[in-house]
Amino acid sequence: MLIRARCNFCDREDHVVLASIKTPLTPEPSFLVRCTGCGLVYMNPMCPVEEEKEFYAHEYYKIGEERHWHENRLSYFEQAFQRIGDSFQTGRLLDVGCGKGYFLEMARKRGWKVYGVDPSQEAVLFARNSLGLEAFAGELKDAHLESESFEVITAWNVLDHMYDPWADLQEIFRILKRGGLLGLRVLNLDFHLFLYHLSNVLGVISVGRLNLSPLVGFHPHMFSSRCIKKWLEKAGFVDIRMENSALVPGTASAVVGRVTEQFLRKLTYLLVESCYYLSLRTLVMGPSLMIFAKKP
Ligand SMILES: [Zn+2]
């Protein structure tokens, strides 16, 4: 049973509908809406928090093979380490939504003292027992981490899944050291909304068997580059840098086949990167945004 949501940022209820959505978690119809007060885009009605938590606690980490999941994400993990390396060589690193801990394992090998937080008990047990990592199972706020205790905090594909992302961003700001670096990866609202409309048009004019709708990703909260920049500035972050995230292989394989998927992925990345550099690094149009910001 879905529940009516309010804007997480300004607590208003009035909104305009952008898209109708269906996910495995929401068998009933739901909508992607834009708050008329602040412009935040979110799912309404939403899954109850408990159901989403249940999914990530027990279902999500069973999907796919262990190493396969990790290998698919190596491209943006490497991209992240390059950016982190521009600011810090080593120190304390916290990964929020660490899952089974593969990113933390890579960081530890690079000399970082690492700590993870994830709502999934099963994933955290794997991180502790199989990888020997330190991690807390639960919500970030319940970990009661010390203020200004980490040089780097990362949250890959996490903020857009959170139910109270504004509070979580403020909590991250509190825990980060002065001069520390935050790294985020979120789905790019602009890209997925464009794909949603394209998919609808192709559906209407029936272009062969091509169905793009499984590629459209809508999460409980959806951020455009403008919105996430505004949030980070409001939370107190400075030196905000945004870029296209390296793409995760395989997402579209089930829809278009592996070879076509590989070709489309490379083509998409080439196009969005061309726009990025031609616009002097202002237009970030790829499927996922990679964002770095500092605490002054
Ligand atoms: Zn709002």
Image (cartoon, rainbow, N blue to C red):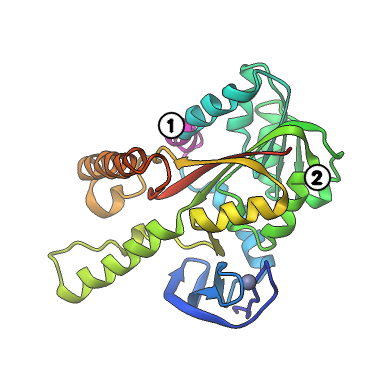
At x 27% / y 55%, what residue is drawn?
Answer: 255
- Sequence order check, earlier mark of 1 and 2: 1
User: Residue 176, located in which quarter of the rendered image?
Assistant: top right
Q: Which residues are magenta?
A: 65-75
Residue found at the far bottom of this picture: 14
Q: How far across and how far down the image is residue 112, in percent?
A: 69, 21
Ligand 1 location (quadrant): bottom right
Q: Is residue 184 left or right of residue 196?
A: right
Is residue 139 visible in the rendered structure shown here? no
The answer to whether 25 is drawn above or below residue 248 in the figure is: below
Kindly indicate the quadrant of the structure image that contains residue 231: bottom right
Magenta stretch: includes residue 129? no
Q: Is residue 17 above or below residue 64?
A: below
Which structural element holds mark 1? helix
Give the distance between the C-alpha atoms of the residues marked 1 and 2, in whole angstroms. Answer: 29 Å
Question: Residue 167, position in %: x, y?
Answer: 74, 58
Q: Inspect this view and state whether residue 18 appears.
A: yes
Q: Which quadrant of the figure contains the C terminus? A: top right
Give the labeled residue for mark 1: 75
Q: Amino acid at mark 2?
A: Arg
Vertical side of 55 occupied by 86: above or below: above
